[in-house]
Image: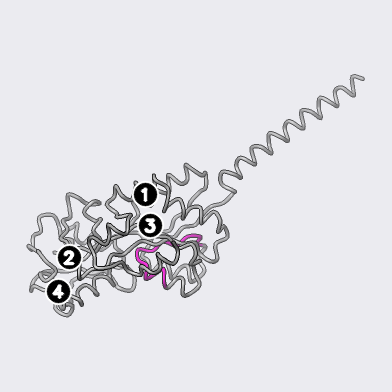
C-alpha cells in the first residue's frame, strides 16, 4: 500500500515537472519561436532602426540580427545568398530591382517613411550656398553620393540634370561617398561646402548641418521600402517585423521624431511627385 502510494506521488511529481517544462517551452516558443531574424537595413536610417528594433524585441521576444550598409551593397549580398529575412533599402529603385530579380516577395513591400532631397551645408554655410545653382559656382567644393551604391546619388544626378547644371557641378565634385553616412560626414566635418542629402539630416545633426530646400519641380520624394525576402527561412516572422515597423504607433513615432515624413500627402507638399508611387499602390 505504501509502495503504491509512493509510486503515485512520484508519478504526480513527474507529471508536474513535465507540465512545467512544457509550459516554459511553449511560452518561449510563443515569444520568439526559437527564431533569429536577419534584417538588412540601409545605413542612412540607423538611429531610427536601432530604436524600432529595440521596441520590436521587447514586444515580441524575437531576436533581430542587423546588417547595415548601402542599398546597393546589401542587395548584392542578398543576391549572393546572404541569409537575409528582410530587406529595407533607402530608395524604391533598389526594391524594384529586388522584385524584378525575384529576391523579395512583392506582396510584402511596404513604405516605412518618405524623404525629400535638399542641399546640405556645414553649420554657418561658409561658402554662402543659397540655391542649387550655387553648386556650379567656381570654387565651391561639392560631394556627391555614388550612384551605384547609395540611393541619394541617383537622385542628386537627376536633380542636377533637371536644373541644367550637371556638367558644371561635376567639375566641382571633390569627393564621392559610397554610403549616406560617409556623405554626411564630409559635410559635418566641413570637408566640403555642400552636397545633396535627405531632408532629415537637419534633425540628426541640428548644430552641425544646415539645409536649403530645393524647388519642388526639381524633386521627387523618395521613400524607404521594406519587404520579406523570397528565401527567408522565417517568412511569417519576417512579415510580423515588417508590419510592426510600418503600422505600430510606437515605431511610427520614432521615425517622426527623427524628422522622417510618414504620410505620402505631406511628402507631396515638398515634391513634384513620389518615386515609384505605383509600387506603394500595388501593395496597399
Highlighted range, magenta: 84-96
Q: Position of residue 164 (x, y in %)?
A: 16, 78
Question: Label 4: how many residues lie within 10 Å, few (<14), some (14-19) or many (20+)?
Answer: some
Which image quadrant: the C terminus?
bottom left
Counting residues from the N terminus, which is met first, the one under dot 2 or under dot 1? Answer: 2
270 lies above or below 175: above
Please tell me which residue lies in front, 51 or 215.
215
Q: Position of residue 132 (x, y in %)?
A: 14, 69
Task: Give the labeled residue for mark 4.
Answer: 172
- Asked if the stretch drawn in magenta spans residue 91, the answer is yes
Question: Label 1: how many residues lie within 10 Å, few (<14), some (14-19) or many (20+)?
Answer: many
Instruction: Indicate the quadrant where residue 169 lies.
Output: bottom left
Counting residues from the N terminus, which is met first, the one under dot 3 or under dot 4? Answer: 3
Counting residues from the N terminus, which is met first, the one under dot 3 or under dot 1? Answer: 3
Task: Give the labeled residue for mark 3.
Answer: 112
Left or right: residue 159 compared with residue 90 = left
Q: Nearer the viewer, mark 4 or mark 2?
A: 2
Counting residues from the N terminus, which is met first, the one under dot 4 or under dot 1? Answer: 4
Marks 4/2: CA–CA distance: 19 Å
Marks 3/2: CA–CA distance: 23 Å
The colour scheme applied to this rendered structure is one colour
Counting residues from the N terminus, which is met first, the one under dot 4 or under dot 2? Answer: 4
Task: Give the labeled residue for mark 2.
Answer: 214
Spot the residue most to the bottom: 167
Which image quadrant: the N terminus?
top right
Q: Disc 2 on helix, strand or loop?
A: loop
Amino acid at each position: 500500500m505504501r509502495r503504491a502510494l509512493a509510486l503515485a506521488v512520484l508519478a504526480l511529481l513527474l507529471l508536474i515537472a513535465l507540465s512545467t517544462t512544457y509550459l516554459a517551452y511553449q511560452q518561449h516558443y510563443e515569444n520568439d519561436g526559437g527564431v533569429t531574424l536577419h534584417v538588412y537595413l540601409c545605413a542612412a536610417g540607423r538611429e531610427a532602426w536601432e530604436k524600432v528594433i529595440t521596441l520590436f524585441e521587447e514586444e515580441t521576444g524575437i531576436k533581430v540580427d542587423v546588417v547595415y550598409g548601402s542599398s546597393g551593397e546589401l542587395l548584392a549580398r542578398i543576391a549572393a545568398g546572404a541569409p537575409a529575412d528582410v530587406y529595407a533599402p533607402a530608395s524604391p529603385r533598389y526594391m524594384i530591382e529586388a522584385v524584378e530579380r525575384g529576391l523579395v516577395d512583392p506582396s510584402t513591400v511596404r513604405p516605412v517613411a518618405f524623404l525629400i532631397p535638399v542641399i546640405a551645408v556645414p553649420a554657418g554655410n561658409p561658402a554662402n550656398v543659397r540655391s542649387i545653382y550655387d553648386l556650379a559656382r567656381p570654387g565651391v567644393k561639392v560631394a556627391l553620393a555614388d550612384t551605384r551604391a547609395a540611393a541619394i546619388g541617383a537622385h542628386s544626378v537627376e536633380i542636377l540634370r533637371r536644373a541644367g547644371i550637371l556638367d558644371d557641378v561635376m567639375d566641382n565634385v571633390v569627393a564621392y561617398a559610397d554610403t549616406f553616412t560617409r556623405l554626411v560626414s564630409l559635410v559635418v566635418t566641413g570637408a566640403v561646402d555642400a552636397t545633396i542629402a535627405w531632408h532629415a539630416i537637419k534633425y540628426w545633426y541640428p548644430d552641425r548641418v544646415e539645409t536649403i530646400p530645393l524647388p519642388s519641380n526639381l524633386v521627387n520624394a523618395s521613400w524607404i521600402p521594406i519587404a520579406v525576402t523570397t528565401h527567408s527561412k522565417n517568412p511569417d516572422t519576417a512579415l510580423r517585423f515588417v508590419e510592426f515597423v510600418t503600422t505600430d504607433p510606437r515605431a511610427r513615432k520614432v521615425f517622426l521624431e527623427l524628422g522622417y515624413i510618414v504620410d505620402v500627402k505631406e511628402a507631396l507638399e515638398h515634391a513634384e511627385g513620389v518615386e515609384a508611387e505605383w509600387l506603394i499602390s500595388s501593395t496597399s
